[in-house]
Amino acid sequence: MSADVSLVLLTGGGSRRMGRDKATMEVEGRALGLRPVEALGALVAEVVVAGRPLPGLQARVVADAVDGAGPLAGVVAGLRAARTPLAVVVACDMPTLVPAVVEMLLDRLRADAGLLAACCEGPRGLEPLPLALRTSAQGSLGAALERGVRALRDALAGPGLIVVDEAGWRPLDPDGHCFVNWNRPEEIDCVVH
């Protein structure tokens, strides 16, 4: 466990493409939203849920900073509630997170006090989640949210962000499992059946 890291779990989305609440949906006998916590629990001192509560999870729950404003609003609320200097942000629909990739992102922040955030560049471009942040980034991200920025990618753009390229993360996650998220029922059916 890292005493300096909080896990911010985003559960505030509308789940429109899935057709039901993703965080509480059971897959193979477990709530989908518990999978990221199970994967990363050993790396963090606390869990903050930004959005809706997740039954069975002992965590502080905070409402999104701006209702209906997307993941950025959950990130800002989670950072404001975190009690540690660093945080890792993941979504409730990321079932195959790789702890080694998250540790690598945290290590990048710890190695350079000038950095506010670290994420990866994947085959499809910038992957905003998983995201390692200093909780002090809440100021700049909150200001972006107040200016009307809604895309997490846009709010992160700037000199305080380090983006780890594929050569940096691929040895830890050869198949890119860390960036999988389940948005539609057929995505789950492919994995479960």
Image (cartoon, helix red, strand yellow):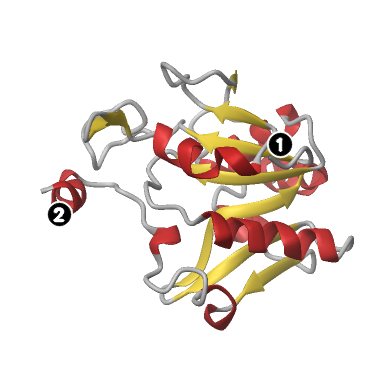
> SS class of the residue under badge 2?
helix
Amino acid type, label 1: Leu
Q: Residue at x 37, y 43 (%)?
A: 93
Left or right: 131 in relation to 160: left
- Name the residue beneath numbered marker 2: 190
| Residue 80: image location, x then y, percent | 74, 31
Amino acid type, label 2: Cys
Labels 1 and 2 touching (C-beta < 8 A): no
| Residue 72: image location, x then y, percent | 59, 44
| Residue 20: image location, x then y, percent | 24, 29
Residue 161 to residue 116: above or below: below
Which numbered mark, 1 or 2, is in the foreground of this view?
Answer: 2
In what quadrant of the picture does the N terminus appear?
top right
Q: Nearer the N terminus, badge 1 or badge 2?
A: 1
Nearest the camera: 34 or 10?
A: 34
Q: Residue at x 37, y 46 (%)?
A: 95
Nearest the camera: 109 or 155?
A: 109
- Name the residue beneath numbered marker 1: 79
> SS class of the residue under badge 1?
helix
